[in-house]
Amino acid sequence: MRSRLFWILAIIYSSLHHIGSGSTSTTLKRPRAGDPFDTFPKNFWQEFSSPFTDTPEDEELEVTETTTHEPFPFFADPYTTLNISTQLSSSVYLHCRVNDLQGKTVSWMRRRGEDLTLITFGQHTYSGDSRYSLEFEEPNDWKLLIQFANERDEGPYECQVSSHPPLVLLVYLTIIVPHVEILDERGSATPEKYYKAGSTIELQCVISKIPHPSSYITWRHGPRLLNYDTSRGGISVKTDMLPGRALSRLYIANANRQDTGNYTCMLGNEITETVVVHVLNGEEPAAMQHANGSRQKANASTMVVLFLVCVCNSGSISVAGIVRGLGSARIWGWGWESRR
């Protein structure tokens, strides 16, 4: 402040001195050597011509800095963990919706314990399994498609965004394996079923644990598809899709020996169950003959046990007692035959 006031007074004095000496020249001249103006700073006249402001020299001017941050990517779903269920051998989409991606990259990973396997990067698929592929759906859905899902596909998957720090969406896939059972007309499960010639074959296929049926239920006799078979005639298939399960009935009228064989109920290609059907022309099934023989042997064994009990109670063993204990029975091969 004092130095500026000194220079102002010096300027006023110099101006009055020139006026008093009668100098009328308006031409600017270079100050003489030793003139006090030589010591003025080069920007003195610029500073002097500007409006004077009494500002303390040690006061700092505050500068407000404004920074605009670009939008940060975020998942459209409010949760960071999703659970998806699908049926065995069906196709399933794993969704990853990302907003404000801002040029970042979306990747799908398969997690097995501590190991991560890259499946897709951007819109490119790097998995060697052709069942995996990436489908982008506008405006923001990066969908991982898994075709023909099997039990090995069950587990956690990660959708990652290459931001800093990276964003991670965890998707856990559950594979539901349906339960298939074939019943007869009485509702009984059996691996083999016997029918007389001329009767009607009736089989029921009950499938449970099917949250989202993705295929039809089909019946096969050996390799032959029966659902749309019109060559034989008399074949009827009726299927009811119920919540969480399905019921399919197979009817074959006027059964004959050619209808003998394996009958398979199928849901897709991997969910199957098979029963063996025998059509007989009046003869007794071999299984029934075996069952009757077993019963006869059991009866013979029971008679022997009772006989020994009787002998022990009588305290004596004689041929006559043996004959009376057996009821005049005689050994016939493997069984006993009573003579009345």
Image (tube, rainbow, N blue to C red):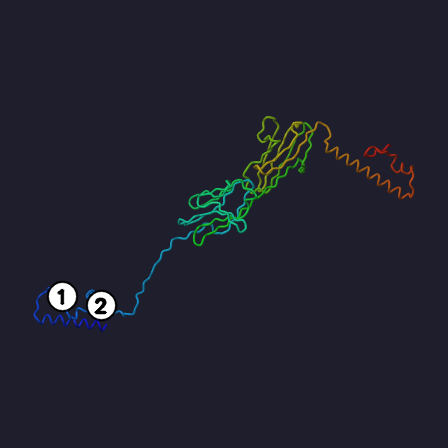
Residue 259 percent across, percent down from the top left: 65, 29
Which residue is rendered at x = 73% and y = 32% of the image? 286
> Mark 1 highlights which residue?
30
Please give left or right for residue 275 compared with residue 148 in the image. right
Q: Secondary structure at mark 1?
A: loop
> Mark 2 highlights which residue?
52
Q: Amino acid at mark 1?
A: Arg
Nearer to us: label 1 or label 2: 1
Which residue is rendered at x = 8% and y = 71% of the image? 21
Which quadrant would the C terminus be assigned to in this image?
top right
Residue 116 percent across, percent down from the top left: 51, 49
Please give left or right for residue 14 compared with residue 275 in the image. left
Q: Nearer the viewer, residue 162 or 203?
A: 162
Q: Nearer the viewer, residue 125 or 88?
A: 125
Q: Nearer the viewer, residue 57 or 259?
A: 57
Which quadrant would the N terminus be assigned to in this image?
bottom left
Q: Secondary structure at mark 2?
A: loop
- Check disc 1: other Cα within 10 Å, few if <14, some if 14-19, many if 20+: few
